[in-house]
Image (tube, helix red, strand yellow):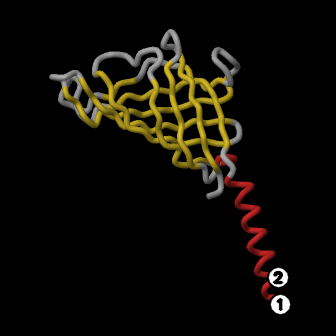
Amino acid sequence: MNFTITALFTALSLSLSAAVFAGDQKTVYYSDIVEPTMIDTMPEGPSVGDIYARHGAVRSSENGPIIGEYVLQATIIVLDLDNKKSARSYMSETVLAEGTIYRLDMVHLDHGNPIKEGHKHAGAIVGGTGKYAGIRGTYELEMLKGGKAVKVTSDYWLGQ
């Protein structure tokens, strides 16, 4: 009898604590778009392996106060110059006061053209530190009017 009660209490405690950590959470922030640094890995000109790196401010709202910074690396993984198409793998780090969030993505683009207003794509949240340790989820990035900032909406959970 005591074993059954102990087992039930333990199972209930574990399920309640998992529920606290597993609840879906959402954050929205805005990142400034800055000119990328291009690393041309040869041959000269656009080619597979070329890297675009950016570093910019993270804001609490569009044109709002700065709450952190991001670093992003995009690498060309597919390049079809005849059809003006490319694909890039993206890795990004968003550093906030409470911790850091890491993201991965692959994005298909019209090669040679800047991302247009209204462009959206989704990717994976793959890890974090501090408050975001154990984070998993998805995010959606949307290019805002004027092409000077993006809105990043993250849906995630912690502790699983």
| Left or right: 63 as drawn, with respect to 89 | right
- Residue in the picture at 15% in, 22% down: 82
Q: Position of residue 13 (x, y in %)?
A: 78, 68
Q: Nearer the viewer, residue 133 or 144?
A: 144
- Residue name at image x 45 percent, y 30 percent: 121
Which element carries disc 1, helix, strand or loop?
loop
Residue at the spot x=39%, y=24% of the render?
37
Residue 137 in which image quadrant: top right
Residue 127 - label: none
Mark 1 vs 2: CB contact within 8 A: yes
Q: How many marks?
A: 2
Residue 2 image point, x, y percent = 84, 88
Residue that sits furthest to the bottom in the current view: 1
What numbered label is drawn on residue 1? 1
Q: Is residue 156 left or right of residue 140?
A: right
Task: Classify 159 as above or below 30.
Answer: below
Q: The disc labelled 2 sits on which kind of residue?
A: Ile
Q: Position of residue 50 (x, y in %)?
A: 29, 31
Q: Position of residue 98 (x, y in %)?
A: 70, 41
**Type of amino acid at the residue the image marks with label 1:** Met
**As displayed, is residue 24 above or below residue 141?**
below
The residue furthest top is 146
Q: Which one is nearer the viewer's eye here, 36 or 90? A: 90
3D distance between C-alphas at marks 1 and 2: 6 Å
Return the residue at label 2.
5
Within-10-Å neighbours for mark 1: few <14, some 14–19, many 20+: few
